[in-house]
Image (tube, helix red, strand yellow):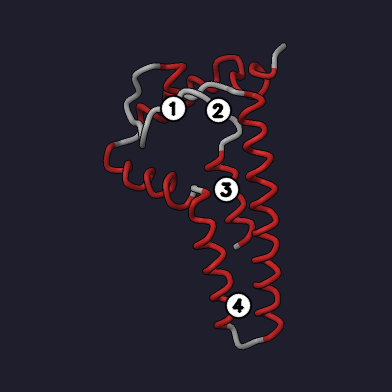
Amino acid sequence: MSWEAVLYDWGGLNGALFQFVNEATPPILMPLAWLFSNVLGNYWTAPLVMLGLWAWSRSTAAVGRALAIRRQLLQFVIGFGIAFAITSILKLWLDFPRPAAVFGQLDHVLGTVEEHYSLPSGHSTYAALVAGAL
C-alpha cells in the first residue's frame, strides 16, 4: 500500500467526494468559495491577522486580557512559521496531484490551474491556524 492510497485516494472516495462537491456547488456560492480560498485561507493574510491581534491587544484596557491577546499573537507567529515550513516540506516531498491533473476539466476552478502539490492543503492548514489563534 502506498502513501498516495492512504493519504490521498481512499479507494476512490476522495475523487468521488471532490467531484460531487465540485459539480453540486451552485454558481451563486462561488464568491463565498473565493472569499474562503483567497482571503480567509491564504497565508498572505497573515500580516493582517498579526496586525489585528496586535491592535486588539492595544485597544484592550484590561492588562491581563491584553497580555493574553499578545500571547496569542506570539503563538500565532510561531505556529505560522512551523505550519508554513512543515506544509511546504510535505508538499514537495509527497508531490500529490491537484484535482485538475487528475480529473481534467472541472466545473468550478478558482484562480490558475495547477497540477502539483495538493497535499497537505495550505489553505486548510492556514485556516486552522487562524481559527486556533482566534
In the picture, the quarter occupied by the C terminus is bottom right
Secondary structure state at the residue bearing disc 1: loop
Percent position (x, y) of residue 11?
60, 14
**Given the current orientation, which residue lies at the most extreme bottom position?**
61
The amino acid on which the numbered mark 4 sits, given as a three-letter code, is: Ser
Mark 3 vs 2, N-terminal side: 2
Which residue is disc 3 drawn over? 126
In three-dimensional space, the C-alpha distance between marks 1 and 2, rounded to whole angstroms, equals: 8 Å
Mark 4 vs 3, N-terminal side: 4
In three-dimensional space, the C-alpha distance between marks 4 and 1, rounded to whole angstroms, equals: 39 Å
Mark 4 or mark 2, which is nearer to you? 2
Which residue is disc 2 drawn over? 117
Residue 72: image quadrant is bottom right
Q: Do residues under tags 4 and 3 come within 8 Å of each other at their CB atoms?
A: no
Residue 110: image quadrant is top left
The amino acid on which the numbered mark 1 sits, given as a three-letter code, is: Glu
For the residue carrying disc 4, how many other residues have a C-alpha within 10 Å: few (<14), some (14-19), or many (20+)?
Answer: many
The amino acid on which the numbered mark 3 sits, given as a three-letter code, is: Tyr
Which residue is disc 1 drawn over? 114
Q: Do residues under tags 1 and 2 come within 8 Å of each other at their CB atoms?
A: yes
Which residue is disc 4 drawn over? 57
The amino acid on which the numbered mark 2 sits, given as a three-letter code, is: Tyr
